[in-house]
Image: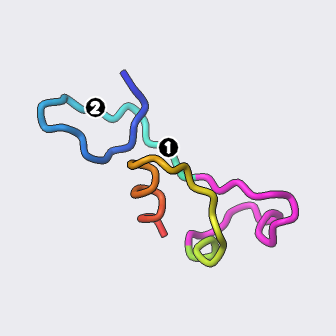
Amino acid sequence: MAPTYILEIPPDLDFIAMRTLPLYAVTSTYHPLAELKSVSVSALAGHPMVLLDLPMSSAYFPSDF
């Protein structure tokens, strides 16, 4: 068992998704959207983001925007 993205799963690997987790945006307390209880992807799209620079992460997360 391993946590992973559902991307590029090799065809010879049996993949069973045990749980699907929602995306979260984490901001500083001073960010203009910080006081909102929920934020749409379109509201976040205009703001810069810090992204983990790994092959899967750098392809996966920007695709949501």
Magenta-colored span: 24-41
Instruction: Give above or below for 2 relative to 54.
Output: above
At x 38% / y 43%, what residue is drawn?
Answer: 5
Q: Quadrant of residue 58?
A: bottom left
User: Label 2 amino acid?
Assistant: Ile
Which residue in the rendered view is the most extreme toward the top?
A: 1
Left or right: residue 8 compared with residue 46: left
Residue carrying label 2: 16
Q: Secondary structure at mark 2?
A: loop
Q: Are marks 2 and 1 in contact (CB under 8 Å)?
A: no
Instruction: Give above or below for 58 relative to 36.
Output: above
Left or right: residue 14 compared with residue 26: left
Crowd class of label 2 (few under 14; some 14 to 19; many from 20; radius 10 Å):
few
At x 39% / y 48%, what residue is drawn?
Answer: 56
Left or right: residue 14 compared with residue 45: left
Instruction: Give above or below for 30 relative to 47.
Output: above
Q: Quadrant of residue 47?
A: bottom right
User: Label 1 amino acid?
Assistant: Leu
Query: The N terminus lies in which quarter of the figure?
Result: top left
Q: Nearer the viewer, residue 52 or 64?
A: 52
Colour logic: rainbow
Task: Measuring from the top left, give residue 13's x and y in whole percent.
Answer: 18, 30
Task: Measuring from the top left, give residue 18's x and y in whole percent.
Answer: 38, 31
Q: Quadrant of residue 16?
A: top left
Main secondary structure along the magenta-highlighted residues: loop
Task: Measuring from the top left, give residue 17's x and y in whole percent.
Answer: 33, 35
Q: Secondary structure at mark 1?
A: loop
At x 49% / y 70%, what residue is drawn?
Answer: 65
Residue carrying label 1: 21
